[in-house]
Amino acid sequence: MSDELGEGEERRGWFRRLKDGLAKSSSKLVGGISGVFTTKRLDEASLEELEDVLITADLGIETSARLIASLSKAKFGKDVTDEEVRTSFAEEIAEILRPAARPLDVATGRKPHIVLMVGVNGSGKTTTIGKLAKQFKDRGLSVMMAAGDTFRAAAIEQLQVWGERTGTPVIAKAQGSDAAALAFDAINEAKAAGADVLLIDTAGRLQNRAELMEELAKVIRVIRKQDETAPHDCVLVLDGTVGQNAHNQVKAFKEMVAVSGLVITKLDGSTRGGVVVALADQFELPVHAVGVGESAEDLQPFDADRFARDLMGLE
Amino acid sequence: MFDSLQNRLGDVFDRLKKRGALKEADVTAALREVRVALLEADVALPVVKEFVDKVRERAIGQEVIKSVSPGQQVIKIVHDNLVEMLGTDSSGINLNAVPPVPILMVGLQGGGKTTSTAKLAKRLKERDRKKVLMASLDIYRPAAREQLRVLGEQIDVATLPISENETPVSIAKRAMTAGKLQGFDVVMLDTAGRLSIDESMMDEVIQVRDAVKPAETILVADAMTGQDAVTTARNFNERVGLTGIVLTRMDGDARGGAALSMRAVTGVPIKAVGVGERADALEDFHPERVAGRILGMGDVVSLVEKAAETIEVEEAERIAKKMQKGAFDLEDMLSQLRQVKKMGGLGGVMSMLPGMGKLQKQMAGANMDDSVIKKQEAIILSMTKVERKNVKLMNASRRRRIAAGSGTSVQEVNKLLKQHQDMTRVMKQMGKMGGMKGLGALLGGGGGMPGMPSPGQMPGQLPSGLGGKGMPKLPGGMLPPGFPGKK
Ligand SMILES: Nc1nc2c(ncn2[C@@H]2O[C@H](COP(=O)(O)OP(=O)(O)OP(=O)(O)O)[C@@H](O)[C@H]2O)c(=O)[nH]1
Ligand SMILES: Nc1nc2c(ncn2[C@@H]2O[C@H](COP(=O)(O)OP(=O)(O)OP(=O)(O)O)[C@@H](O)[C@H]2O)c(=O)[nH]1
Ligand SMILES: [Mg+2]
Ligand SMILES: [Mg+2]
């Protein structure tokens, strides 16, 4: 992520917001754990309560059980302190997350490097495109966007506003036109303009709607007519408040459109986004970034250790 | 990934058949499985605990009815309590106030507020014959007001003209004034998405509330929400004061435990559920359906009831017989189409069955949706009785006439005839093979849908009906076999 000193003010606000958000998320979790442990013997009852605490963070039953099992193996029957438990959990979580922390690499010299954003309705695709455009531009890359959501009311106008905000050209057609054809034309235009990156927005769709998933597969087929290696990244945007359905989402999108990475949004809220831990555990997909607000700056690289330690309320 | 509760409980109770009353230890063992099922469905943990305690209290000591297994008995208790906790069927929107009646829509970012505002407005306009004005107070999200304006145009509902540099409170006031002056019955206020921990944004919506005194303040929330549902619902309820919930994206495959979480912490009713992106994709809330979905067992009970209600058994059996002989004419096809329609369309039938996700997907893939049913019905209705009995009469000019009469194209007529032909052929073969067992038979009355997975491929399992062995057989011919085929 590029740091522009001129934006110091805004940036500080953003960090504070993130920190406040995370503090809020972790305080509940930590409060829970502290309630279970001050210094006491790790027995069945405390393990069960501890498991509840993880479940409340959306880690899901399987992942929670796994973490508990490994904690219990190491420490069962011993006297443990609050700090020890937290550290142990954070380490365990970070280990799961570390391989997933990989930023989106678009400086590949391809002209353009094509990124397709997909996901269920309202998860934050369009906003994330705006945020990414800003990051890439700040890095000196030339960026274009394609308004591939030709379905939802004012989806095109929404992306156009992001284009204005970030000084990025937006390729668009009228609402109701064919999304695949739009993508095809957009690639042509991006090539002609010599753009480094082309970010293609798509309409939100639920993963169990076969006909909509098929439509997305068609967009990709048409993109490949322009460039066999494209899309170079297919990013699934997940809403951070999502529960266990995230598994179905990743699975279905991965099968249908070869998702190459994830972005998790809305982590500035009261949600903990713990499902990310389970996802990283289950699917080998990088988490490129996390959304922490609604402005262009509110996109953070995903840092496994920090995420894990913050989640556990450790400095 | 999700086993149905029935399967889980089967194991627990296998050991303890033939016991008179449900004992504490048995109930506790069963409720451990219930707890897991609820958590997998994203019911928030505190709510799960409360629920499990309540069920434990009620279950211990209950006599096990002779004809059911202890597992089934517990499921029934769990199911009934879940229904109770989810509340009653949808109550309508409260319009008991001096018009224009303000309705305030609130919720997190991207939950579906703007879309649901339009859906409710459309319903109020069409069902309740109300004159509705919509206004967007979302001055933050790019093109948010434009979005509502476009939706208003699509559903032919007025929207407040957009003007720049106005605060949400002043837009709300302007909307109420316009509503009064122009004789609107209802003013729907769509607001920007906000986090429940964002103090200044929460203050903003409180100011709006105080300015307009809404008759309803509705939290719009995503059915896919995880454990955070309790926090969000509680915060919105405590700060803003809710009167109802609209649960969106119930057309997805989330188990929807958030419904229970939010209902439990707020105590307000779920007013409606969103089942799609279009303005008419709004349904009433049915606690039984959602309870079955949360438990992962489908709403078999109401499927059976509904089937019994709507299907004329004799008619269905007559058709099933004709099918097997391959003497299935277009009149029969029409009768089948109508039965599916009565059952609430294909979606209605499918949504009531457990483990139907895959099947639903295939149907969607094959363009089997209700609009197709309507179209096909129209085509057959445009044929004469003689034509319906004898497909061979169908020459080019008749086909043209039928297309014109039904507002379709000749290709569509051809497609239907081709499907009828395919169905007849497949059914003849099926008849020879002695018909399909299991679900195929259930749905197709001894027929079976070509291109559909065999029962073995079906995800999940049909739980046995309460008290009986195996799925209660529905009268034959619920769904037309092979219907309505691919594009
Ligand atoms: N607080 C917060 N809000 C976000 C974040 N990312 C997106 N949003 C908001 O979530 C809402 C939905 O975002 P969109 O970008 O429109 O989502 P989308 O996936 O494009 O939606 P559809 O195209 O309708 O499927 C908007 O109000 C965004 O401002 C985030 O990281 N934090
Ligand atoms: N599948 C499905 N999509 C829905 C449903 N309700 C809303 N959507 C979609 O969800 C996305 C977000 O809906 P909006 O109405 O813009 O959500 P919002 O709460 O107004 O969003 P913000 O104003 O950004 O907070 C859009 O793509 C809608 O089409 C539903 O019931 N099912
Ligand atoms: Mg979008
Ligand atoms: Mg909105």
Image (cartoon, rainbow, N blue to C red):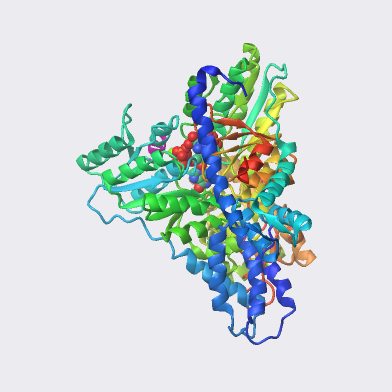
The residue segment tinted magenta is B150-155
Instruction: Name the one closer to the observer, B440 or B238.
Output: B238
Residue at 70% across, 68% down: B7
Instruction: Name the one closer to the observer, B106 or B382.
Output: B106
Is residue B206 visible from the viewing direction of this image? yes
Report which quarter residue B74 is drawn in: bottom right
Report which quarter residue A69 is drawn in: bottom right
From the top left corner, tell me how far across and down residue A129 is, in percent: 57, 28
From the top left corner, tell me how far across and down residue A148 is, in percent: 57, 29
The quarter of the rendered structure image containing the N terminus of chain B is bottom right
Q: Is residue B154 magenta?
A: yes
Question: Residue most toward the left?
Answer: B181
From the top left corner, tell me how far across and down residue B283 is, in percent: 46, 54
From the top left corner, tell me how far across and down residue A201 is, in percent: 58, 29
Q: Image check: B189 left or right of A239?
A: left
Would you say the magenta stretch is mainly helix, strand or loop? helix
Residue at 46% across, 31% down: A154
Question: Residue most toward the top?
Answer: A193
The quarter of the rendered structure image containing the C terminus of chain B is top right
Residue at 59% across, 21% down: A3
Q: Decide: is A298 above or below B121.
A: above
